[in-house]
């Protein structure tokens, strides 16, 4: 590529000083906006809390870079929250982006004034400015994207230029998948290059290498295990590009709507600044007929700017017409403006017009500045409302952002099944809440209820660019679906329960209009805690700290580790809160790694990317006994608690503590086991060669209405060990009749016949098993059938020499 340069000696000092002054003003105004946008910090939650999900595949390099940045700050003694440091880093990236574009335009067209005006025009455009302030990957993606275009435009040896630009484009894609659009820019650059298509190979090769490295860093940083990919679909991995339903062509299926939404996004990003100045300059250039001769042969840099605009716009038109990175389409426009503004006196029309537009842009109030950010305003209000140990009841789950800057004692109300996978606050259903609130009030702590604004638009997206305050920006009610009326009913149902049990005083309103109600005990109300938690008065903080350490282990889910820390902070303020103690102990009962952590078959509970445990860790028996003793304090006579005891017995078996395992199993059976618990108990007995006890359970299971073919197969194993071969054969035949595709019964029956010397019967069963299609567990069991069949055939071939087989 050979870009034209402006003729004559350049005198850049005045324009450069003007640019530096404008850049200083941009930095100063930016710092006044910080901290910015508290309702969009999920990358920081990934960095600091470990919560990450499929959306990060769209920005794979961002959180690992933040991790490196955090480690660097740690060397200098910084250990606080990363929200402000990340936004300061992004402001720095914005400075580098503007400086790079200024340098490119000045080099290309020789006018520092035009370069300064174009760069500042971009800097104060709404899209660039706001995205640079947020703790998102947009600033780094924008810097990498601008670097790729600038390197291509500035000229130099083709191999080095296209290689470096490809690496920058790959980094841009690592920070935001939209950076893949730069491949089209590389194609246009190669087309304009006079060296053929080989430069495109250098560009795409370097870009692919950088993208692969970004993904490799992401996988290594999060420790993504192979099991994760087995349950992750491509739609889930890259579907997060869309973010909001209906913003991609795949879900809206309406090209006209997509085009309108994209146009609105572009106008919001730069309509009053850079797009307006671009349109003005184009009209003036055409009117003066200055540009007519050159219009037939556009400059290479102008081609790249247009290609960048088209490529990014096409990406967002297809995938996400309302994405915050839409301003990337405008990043290279300073190169185009420099090309149009260079001839004659037109630059002196452009420069003041651009400065005026930039000045107007600097006066626009950004929606999520500290004084207006809904999440920040509300958490500041709650900080003043709630004292030490006071509790806020929330109809749903509080967003993590409410707990990021400050810690509040929230009680979430809703369906534990729907909220339990993500909510770190204790979860209650409405009918179990009253007892806990009464005890909290008895201790002299205040309790409030977040009534919210029932007139709010529940279906609006949190982070609405207009700055409108939405109830969903503080908490959400997962069990209520997307129907606004159902969400309102969920809140009202909690309110009715509280009205019936307490004196409720409402009218407390936050600056945003959300309502909070204070709760007071009614005269004569019950003041003693429930019987379930009374024994926990003797549980001290040292025991709870031991539990917390157990919950910090590798086999425990990220949510459980975070919830354990949340509860320990709660108890540090309110050490006599029996219910918080119960929450922590119940969390340990569910999550503490008694047998190697999360069950390998329960992959759905493993957070995205967390490795499954490889075996039981070497925890001390004494420490586990203390954990188990605490769990015993809450044992109830119901199947779910009895089933937990079976898990403990399994741990004892693996630890070689047979007597403890038998005692625990007997106790679990006395409490009453569920069918799945009974099966696990029988397997546990079998593993200890106690077939008599196992057989008693299998007989009970097969006699029930919910018996399964596998129950008969497992019973047959015990029957054979007890010397009841004929009964075992009948059980296995019954299992096959119940489930003809169950290969396990074929394996067992054929093996039984073989051990009895009935090789022809055994061979017949093996053949029938191998003929089964779409069998359960086919991979390993079919291999056993093949090996067994071959062995029986071998014995049959040897049988004539030994006197013949049994029939």
Image: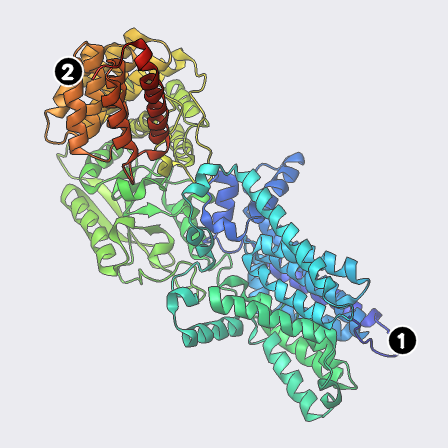
- First reached walking from the N terminus: tag 1 or tag 2: 1
Q: Is residue 247 above or below residue 697?
A: below
Single out the residue that lies furthest toward the top: 659
Q: Is residue 559 left or right of residue 156?
A: left
Residue 176, visible in the rendered structure: yes
Residue 493 position, x and y percent, is 18, 50
Check disc 1 and report its element: helix, strand or loop: loop
* Within-10-Å neighbours for mark 1: few <14, some 14–19, many 20+: few
Looking at the picture, how far across and down is residue 303, in whole percent? 68, 75
Split into 4 quadrants, where in the image is the N terminus? bottom right
On screen, 645 above or below 128? Answer: above
Badge 2 crowding class, 10 Å Cα cut-off, few under 14, some 14 to 19, many 20 or more, is: few
On the picture, is 204 further left or further right than 523? Answer: right
Quadrant containing the C terminus is: top left
Q: Position of residue 69 (x, y in %)?
A: 63, 43
Please name the residue shown 26% across and 49% down the image: 479
Against 448, is 706 above or below?
above
Badge number at residue 726 = 2
Q: Which residue is mark 1?
A: 9
Q: CA distance from mark 1 to mark 2?
A: 105 Å
Front position in the image: 53 or 361: 53
| Pick the front one: 666 or 328 | 666
Q: Quadrant of residue 533?
A: top left
**Of residues 779 and 659, which is closer to you in this image?**
779
Q: Quadrant of residue 563?
A: top left
């Amino acid at each position: 590529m050979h870009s034209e340069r402006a003729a004559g000696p350049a005198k850049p000092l005045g324009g450069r000083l003007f640019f530096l002054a404008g850049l200083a003003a941009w930095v100063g105004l930016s710092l006044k906006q910080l901290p910015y946008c508290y309702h969009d910090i999920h990358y920081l939650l990934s960095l600091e809390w470990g919560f990450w999900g499929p959306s990060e595949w769209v920005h794979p390099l961002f959180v690992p870079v933040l991790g490196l940045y955090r480690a660097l700050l740690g060397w200098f003694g910084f250990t606080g929250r990363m929200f402000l440091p990340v936004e300061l880093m992004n402001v720095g990236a914005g400075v580098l982006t503007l400086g790079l574009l200024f340098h490119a335009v000045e080099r290309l067209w020789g006018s520092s004034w035009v370069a300064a005006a174009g760069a500042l025009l971009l800097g104060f455009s709404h899209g660039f400015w706001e995205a640079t302030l947020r703790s998102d990957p947009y600033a780094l993606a924008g810097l990498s994207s601008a670097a790729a275009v600038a390197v291509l435009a500035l000229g130099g040896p083709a191999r080095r230029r296209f290689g470096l630009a490809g690496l920058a484009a790959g980094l841009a894609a690592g920070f935001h998948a939209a950076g893949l659009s730069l491949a089209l820019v590389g194609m246009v650059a190669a087309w304009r290059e006079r060296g053929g298509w080989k430069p495109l190979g250098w560009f795409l090769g370097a870009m692919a290498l950088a993208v692969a490295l970004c993904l490799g860093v992401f996988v290594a940083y999060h420790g993504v295990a192979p099991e994760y990919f087995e349950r992750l679909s491509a739609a889930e991995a890259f579907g997060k590009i869309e973010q909001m339903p209906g913003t991609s062509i795949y879900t809206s299926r309406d090209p006209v709507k997509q085009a309108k939404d994209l146009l609105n996004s572009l106008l919001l990003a730069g309509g009053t600044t850079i797009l307006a100045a671009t349109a003005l300059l184009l009209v003036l250039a055409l009117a003066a007929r200055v540009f007519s001769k050159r219009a037939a042969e556009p400059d290479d840099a102008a081609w790249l700017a247009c290609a960048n605009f088209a490529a990014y716009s096409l990406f967002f038109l297809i995938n996400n017409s309302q994405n915050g990175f839409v301003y990337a389409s405008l990043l290279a426009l300073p190169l185009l403006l420099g090309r149009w503004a260079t001839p004659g006196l037109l630059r002196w029309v452009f420069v003041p017009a651009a400065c005026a537009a930039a000045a107007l842009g600097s006066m626009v109030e950004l929606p999520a500045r500290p004084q207006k950010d809904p999440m920040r305003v509300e958490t500041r209000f709650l900080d003043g409302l709630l004292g030490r140990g006071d509790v806020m009841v929330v109809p749903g789950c509080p967003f993590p952002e409410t707990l990021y800057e400050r810690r509040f004692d929230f009680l979430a109300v809703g369906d534990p099944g729907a909220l339990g996978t993500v909510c770190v606050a204790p979860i209650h259903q409405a009918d179990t809440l009253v007892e806990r609130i009464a005890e909290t009030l008895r201790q002299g702590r205040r309790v409030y209820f977040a009534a919210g604004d029932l007139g709010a638009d529940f279906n609006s997206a949190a982070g609405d660019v207009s700055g409108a305050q939405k109830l969903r920006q503080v908490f959400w009610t997962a069990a209520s679906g997307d129907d606004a009326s159902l969400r309102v009913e969920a809140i009202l149902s909690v309110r009715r329960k509280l009205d019936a049990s307490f004196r409720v005083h409402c009218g407390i309103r936050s600056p945003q209009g959300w309502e909070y109600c204070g709760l007071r005990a009614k005269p004569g109300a019950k003041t003693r805690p429930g019987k379930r938690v009374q024994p926990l008065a003797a549980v001290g903080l040292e025991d709870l700290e031991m539990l917390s350490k157990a919950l910090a282990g590798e086999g425990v889910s990220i949510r459980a580790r975070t919830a354990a820390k949340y509860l320990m902070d709660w108890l540090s303020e309110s050490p006599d809160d029996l219910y918080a103690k119960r929450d922590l102990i119940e969390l340990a009962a569910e999550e503490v790694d008694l047998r190697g952590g999360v069950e390998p078959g329960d992959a759905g509970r493993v957070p995205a990317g967390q490795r499954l445990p490889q075996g039981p860790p070497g925890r001390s028996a004494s420490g586990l006994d203390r954990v188990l003793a605490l769990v015993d304090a809450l044992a109830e006579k119901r199947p779910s608690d009895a089933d937990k005891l079976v898990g403990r017995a399994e741990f004892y078996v693996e630890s070689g503590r047979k007597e403890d395992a038998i005692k625990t199993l007997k106790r679990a059976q006395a409490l009453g086991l569920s069918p799945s618990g009974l099966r696990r108990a029988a397997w546990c007995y079998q593993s200890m060669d106690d077939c008599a006890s196992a057989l008693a359970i299998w007989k009970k299971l097969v006699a029930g209405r919910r018996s399964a073919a596998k129950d008969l197969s497992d019973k047959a194993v015990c029957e054979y060990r007890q010397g009841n071969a004929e009964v075992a054969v009948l059980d296995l035949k019954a299992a096959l009749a119940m489930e003809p595709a169950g290969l396990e019964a074929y394996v067992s029956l054929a093996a039984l016949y073989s051990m009895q010397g009935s090789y022809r019967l055994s061979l017949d069963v093996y053949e029938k098993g191998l003929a089964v299609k779409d069998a359960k567990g086919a991979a390993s069991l079919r291999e056993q059938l093949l090996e067994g069949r071959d062995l029986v055939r071998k014995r049959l071939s040897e049988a004539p020499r030994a006197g013949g087989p049994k029939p």
